[in-house]
Amino acid sequence: MNDELIPRDGLDGARAWCHVIYGLHTLAVVVGVAGAATVAGAFVFGVPSLIAVFLNYLKRGEVRGTWLDSHFRWQIRTFWFTLLWLLVYGLLVITIIGIPVAWLLIVFLGVWVAYRVVRGWLALAGRRPVGSP
């Protein structure tokens, strides 16, 4: 993305909401690490992330066409891809042969979720879209 085409003014409220959403996702990851749940499970089924994804969809229209749009898309995709991979995990774990693969998948998925939250929040703090150098 060309920075000259990305409006930076007038987005302070939406940017604050984006910080709140990353904070809620981070809380879900911490609950997953500290609690009995997996990181991915807490991320998808935990109240903080459910509130976060609801806010993503609620506030998404306010940022359409701005640099914050990439963050909202990043957060929403992280949630839905995590849910998809949890379904794959569920299918693997119900088979005897798939259990070792399922355990590797759930560990990888937890690391991936944490990475996505940290990378996105750092990009937001730097006032740049997710995925830009």
Image: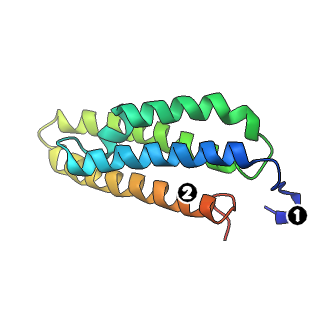
Label 1 neighbour load within 10 Å: few <14, some 14-19, many 20+: few
Residue beneath the point at 44% across and 45% down: 25
Q: Which mark is residue 107?
A: none
Q: Amino acid at mark 2?
A: Gly
Q: Is residue 107 left or right of residue 60?
A: left
Q: Is residue 13 left or right of residue 6?
A: left
Q: Which residue is mark 1?
A: 4
Q: Which residue is mark 2?
A: 120
Residue beneath the point at 70% across and 43% down: 13
Q: Picture coordinates of residue 130 (x, y %)? A: 63, 58
Residue beneath the point at 48% across and 55% down: 116
Q: How many marks?
A: 2
Q: Is residue 68 left or right of residue 2?
A: left
What is the residue that sits farthest to the right in this orientation?
Answer: 4
Q: Picture coordinates of residue 57 (x, y %)? A: 61, 30
Q: Amino acid at mark 1?
A: Glu
Quadrant containing the C terminus is bottom right
Residue beneath the point at 55% across and 39% down: 76
- Against 80, is 78 above or below? below
Quadrant containing the N terminus is bottom right
Whichever of callouts 2 and 1 sits on the residue coming sooner in the sequence is 1
Q: Is residue 59 left or right of residue 29?
A: right
Distance, label 2 to label 1, CA atoms, is: 21 Å
